[in-house]
Image (cartoon, rainbow, N blue to C red):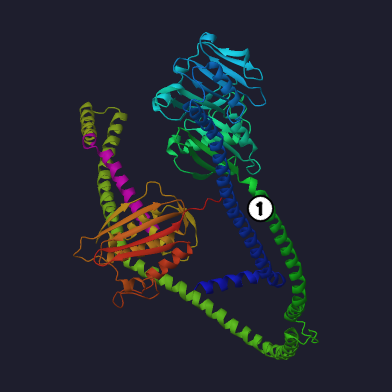
Amino acid sequence: MSTTLLNRFIAQISGKVPLRIMIVIPFVILVTIAGGLTGYLSLRNGQEAVNNVAMQLRNEITARIQERVKNYLETAHLVNELHVNTISLEQIALNDTKSLERYFWKQIQTFSEVTNTFIGLPDGRFVGGRQFRNGEPQIILADESTNGGLNYYDADAQGNRTVVVEGEPNYDPRGRGWYKTAKTKGEAIWTNVYSEFTTKSPAITAAQPVYDKNHQFVGVVGSTAMLTDVSEFLSGLKIGKSGQTFIVERNGQLVAYSGQIGQKATERIKATAEDNSNVLIRETAKHLEAQYPDLLEINDTLQQDFILDGARQFLQVTPLKDTRGIDWLIVVTIPEADFMEQIDDNTRMTIWLSLISLALTTLIGLFTARGIIQPVLNLNNATKRFAEGHWDQKLPTERTDELGDLARSFNSMGDQVKKSFNALENVNATLEEKVKERTKDLAKALDELKNSQAQLVQSEKMASLGQMVAGVAHEINTPLGYVRSNIEMTRDLFSEVESLTTIYDKLIEMLLTEGTNEEELSEQLTTVTEMSQNFRDDDTFNETKTLYDDIIHGLDQIADLVLNLKDFSRVDSVRVQNVSLNECIDSVLVIGHNVIASKVAVFKQYADTLPPVECSPSHINQVLLNILTNAAQAIDDKTQGKIVVTTRADDKNVYVEIEDNGKGIPEDVRAKIFDPFFTTKPIGEGTGLGLSISYQIIEQHHGHIDVASTIGKGTKFTITLPRQSTKTA
């Protein structure tokens, strides 16, 4: 099925595209697909390679940082071990401050990885050495000679103190965290990262308790490592083109970092702080904090990707721990763009090469197609000329391929068609005469058919009218009866008026005659007064007016019946009006009252505001009468007959629904009820044209009739007619 649909689709497309283009299209599509796949695979493979390289680079960078930081920090503990061994072997006396000063002054010059190294003694003394990078070694001392303060001294070539460089009052090593923690734990420890006293740079101190040969506590030695050296190391690493790395404590404070963060080297800030101007470090820390609000949750190396300013960033976080208290995180971030530049260049080059290949394929294909299609175009032009009646079309036949065979076949076909056409012209002349004669016969038959159809319509209408005659006669006799009765009563009243007028005339004559007897005049006045009073008591004049109103009403009923019969009987009327279907139904119910309402109860459910319909009223009346009559005839005498007539409308149409509770129409009959001459009535009781003519009338009015029926429950006819046109003349 799918193959058939594909072939049909290709046929439809190929039928609308010129052949010279159609030949080139497959090659263009193939080159486009090949170029697209090549570019896509190149880009995908490049991205996979980038992911692998980025992962390896992150692992390598992290490993180098771990190794360097551990080695750098381990030096401080090695120095402390050296001090512990020296003291344990009693190679130096702890109570000889001068010896301690020269010892630490000498040791600080040996290890460049530590900034200062010292010892804190239980008696409150603090002795050590300090040397900043590219600086002279100094002696650190706090004892009774410094009045409890901490002083930094320059020293001569033999390690003797000379002058105080700087100091800090009230310094007691026994109250410092490094001293108390190392003494309490009894093992080597790291302090928290802090700002060094003099430089205020981040530093960390390695501390270790010292015991004599009797295992008695004699002090705590310590060595301080400046973390700025770690930052310098990180800044010197080559991490792609713009990658960054940093070390952060579990609380988010920066320990060391590559690049610049916009702060003085002596100040410590959180990696996520807005003061951190290193966007990559700041946003990496924010992403990490969003993923892990508690950095203590990170216990293993994790690799993630995140988006920064629409660009993908490769992230690796690795814990850095030791047994002495170091618990940091090494974070490496490498922008994908650092690796994708060459891949993007290669992708662009692939696209350009694909486009060039596509252009060359199109040009070569067009030139090739031209050589193939030109003979076909010649054949097409010759065929068109041939179709226009130019029979002397000849194609060159010098080619020996399939196109040459086609040209020869065309020339041969042209000769045969020319001969056949000449023969057809002779036959056509004879046929034209026969066709003219046959056309005249058909026209005459058509006129006869139209006349027959009009007669059938008239016959059906008159048949329907004949069925109504008895009922209409009864309807006319009823108003005629009470009109006659009212006229007779009026005649009697007129006799009384005539008598009253005679008496009045006699009274006037007596009044005008001289010498009239007063007694006779009085009697005449009494008679006139009594008759006048009787008229008033009997309300004669009002009764006469009522009788006349009844007479006029009866005559109006007769006139309406006659007018409805006149309109209904005019089948040939083509008069079109805008009428209300409610009024049409009322008129039909008046005409068919004796046949319809005498058998069933008619219930009218009219729409309150029914828009007018542009139609021929007499034709629509015929349709309504046919359907209402059929509905009444479909109801058995034993059934409590009911017909419901409903009207309604929407934005486009007006609807009339005529529903009865009769016996219903079987399904096999329902499909034929609109066929001419089809009837289920006994012979002689129906022509079978009523519903057929009704169907044609509604179709001529651009409407339609629908029927729904259930056996034993009844039938509903729905007439749909378009609303009155909104166009103005």
Rendered residue at 27%/48% (across/down): 491
* Residue where numbered disc 1 is placed: 343
Task: Check disc 1 and report its element: helix, strand or loop.
Answer: helix
Residue 271 seen in this snapshot: no
In this rendered view, identify the residue nearer to me: 276 or 577.
276
Q: Residue furthest left?
A: 638
Is 562 magenta? The answer is yes
Chief secondary structure of the magenta portion:
helix
259 shown above or below 45? above
Numbered range of the magenta stretch: 535-563
Image position, residue 74 (x, y; %): 53, 34
632 shown above or below 380? above
Is residue 610 rendered to the left or right of residue 372? left
Image position, residue 620 (x, y; %): 42, 60
Within 10 Å of disc 1 (Cα), the crowding (few <14, some 14-19, many 20+) is some
In this rendered view, identify the residue nearer to me: 264 or 441.
264
Is residue 665 rendered to the left or right of residue 729? left
Callout 1 amino acid: Ile
- Quadrant in which residue 633 is drawn: bottom left
156 shown above or below 556? above
Image position, residue 459 (x, y; %): 40, 72
Image position, residue 681 (x, y; %): 29, 74
Is 514 magenta? The answer is no
Is residue 291 rendered to the left or right of residue 664? right
